[in-house]
Image (cartoon, grey):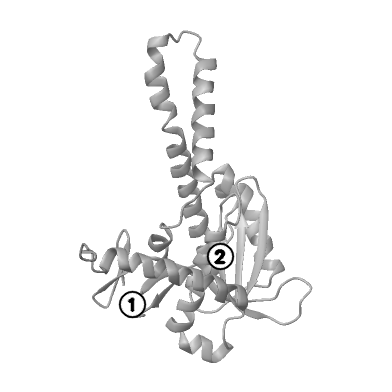
Amino acid sequence: MAKQSKYYDVDGRSVPRVTSILNLIAKPQLPPWMVKVDVENLAKRIIEDDFWVVADLPEMVKAAKREHVRLRNEAAAIGTQFHAMAENYVRTRAIPDPESFSELPGEIQRMWPGFIRFMDDWKVQPVGEPESFVYDPHTRRPYGGVLDLPALVTPPKKEKPRFVILDYKTSSEIWPIHIIQAAAYFYAYEISYPDAIKKHGPLKGCVIARFDKAGVEEIKYYPRGAMRHNYRIFKCYAEAWHLNNNGDSSGDEEE
């Protein structure tokens, strides 16, 4: 399985990534945030520069308009580093020593204790490998993706473990698109790993565990029924993606 920018090459077949398909979904929270960040950055530049003149404004505005891009890239890098640390912890149970931990970005330092607490409180027992590749070979709308971890978990105040998929997020909220994404992984996992399903039974649900840069943690369990509902939504987007990228683009004949 080879990963490209928007596709996975699976057995000589290019299939879209779940995230590529979900890029069809508008993110209404982004434009207001982008405007807010850029305006605040421009105001900061104007206030802090005692010697600016009107002629400087075009360049100041241009620089300020790049602020949201910088912050998004920075957040993506933090998310990538956090996921790498989580994967390493699942594989080795290794915890960074105090000196190494102090050198990590402040955001990671605030996220990490919540992650360890979640792993302990929910008694997470990995099933198979972290960063598991999943693939649905459906002839009309195939797709692939990488889920964070299939696992047995025992929620607090519960006695019986549940077979679930885990999805870690470092966002400011758990957005609806995250649940749709998890549902796509959920059903593709059952197709991709029949031996695990045979051993542990069908997946019971999904746990989305969010750890943000302020140190806030949010753990939500979504049962199989919620996965089924969101998978129906995902299939609509997958169908649209494939029609747009692989369907007949000639259109109907003009009347």
Q: Quadrant of the N terminus?
A: bottom left
Residue 93 sits in quarter: bottom right
Which of these two is toward me, 205 or 95? 205
Of the pair 110 and 209, the residue shown nearer to us: 209
Q: How far apart are marks 2 and 1 (CA)?
A: 22 Å
Q: Is residue 137 left or right of residue 166?
A: left
| In the depicted structure, whether residue 57 falls above or below residue 12 | above
Residue found 37% across the figure and 20% down from its top: 59
Foreground residue, 119 or 141? 141
Give the quarter of the image for residue 154. bottom right
Please, which residue is most extreme toward the bottom here? 198
Q: Which of marks 2 and 1 is in front?
A: 1
Residue furthest to the right: 157
In the image, residue 29 lies at what x, y percent?
54, 46
Disc 1 crowd, CA 10 A, few/some/many (<14, 14-19, 20+) = few
Q: How many marks?
A: 2
Residue wearing tag 2 = 179
Sequence-wise, the earlier of marks 2 and 1 is 1
The residue pinned by badge 1 equals 140
Q: Which amino acid does label 2 sit on?
A: Ile
- Give the answer, above or below, for where 97 lies relative to 251: above
**Which x, y percent locates residue 200?**
58, 87
**Is residue 131 among what the camera can see?**
no
Residue at 41 percent of width and 58 percent of height: 24
Q: Where is residue 253 in the image (x, y as percent from the top left)?
A: 20, 65
Residue depicted at x 48% and y 89%: 195
Q: Is residue 108 visible to us here?
A: yes
